[in-house]
Amino acid sequence: MAKREVRDLLRAQVTDGRFRMVDVDPASRPGLKGGKSRALKDITKNQDVLFEWHERLYAEHKRSLLVVLQGMDTSGKDGTITHVVRNFNPQGVMITPFKAPTPEEKRHGFLWRIRRRVPVPGDIGIFNRSHYEDVLVARVHGLATPAVIERRYDQINEFEKQLVKDGTTVVKLCLDISFVEQRKRIADRLKDPDKQWKFNPNDIDERAYWDDYMSAYGLAITRCSTRWAPWYVIPANDKVYRNWAVTMILAETLREMNPQYPHPKLDVPRLLKRLKA
């Protein structure tokens, strides 16, 4: 039997018409054989792999890759960028953190600011939070009516479908941690003077809406995990496993894209002769 890719193991499964976050164990490690030492070995082995595939993508200059990172506060979005995305060529990576929309952004449709940051051919775009905030936070805090949110699911699917049609591969990663693990990570930030700058009092307030967020994530993934842009749910209590899983998914995705170095027609002997002149 052929070895299953990590993408297959972590692809969100919609059962009976619904994906449920509670069906994922945030402390599990699907696909990892051998524990932490094996994970670190695989991560190291794939560092050069990711760089080379990105170099090929950058040189080919025909397609792009968009990585969407979502997850609750402290789920590891910044850590994923630090430990995994650093393996790409920085001149071809654009990282965009999406915070609360500015007054100018509010004057436009919710996808306006997103469209402005999609990666150009050859590049890899990283969204730290994304257009999904407008069906997650908006649903939990009643910032839009249920009818508006329903329309947004369809708009998101059409937007992502067009991205794929235009040559952008979309990889959507939901980093899943437990309620207990989040409490621990917030406490660690408060206790460490070098990490207190990352603390936001709102992180504690938002914990009161945990179940609502889990429901909103389940609905978003149910409605927007499509054939052209599937969702992958990463158990993220274990940071090493999280980095391993994201590394493997990105390596598998780029391998499937299979970008190629261009081979321009050059008169190499004549050019070398000129070089010697």
Image (tube, helix red, strand yellow):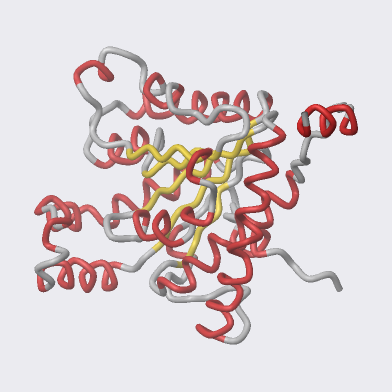
Q: Is residue 158 left or right of residue 5?
A: left
**In the picture, residue 236 is in which quadrant?**
bottom left
Residue positioned 62% across, 29% down in the render: 121
Residue at the top extreme of this rendering: 107
Residue 4 position, x and y percent, is: 74, 67
Residue positioned 56% across, 35% down in the render: 123
Q: Nearer the viewer, residue 62 or 7?
A: 62
Q: Nearer the viewer, residue 128 or 1?
A: 128
Q: Is residue 45 left or right of residue 83?
A: right
Residue positioned 44% across, 50% down in the render: 218
Residue 212 position, x and y percent, is: 29, 50
Q: Looking at the figure, which quarter contains the C terminus?
A: top right
Q: Is residue 59 above or below residue 111?
A: below
Residue positioned 37% across, 53% down in the render: 71
User: How many numbered circles are shown?
Assistant: 0
Residue 118 position, x and y percent, is: 49, 28
Q: Looking at the figure, which quarter contains the N terminus?
A: bottom right
Q: Is residue 250 above or below residue 68?
A: below
Q: Is residue 23 left or right of residue 270?
A: left
Residue 84 position, x and y percent, is: 48, 59
Q: Nearer the viewer, residue 179 or 58?
A: 58
Q: Is residue 199 left or right of residue 76?
A: left
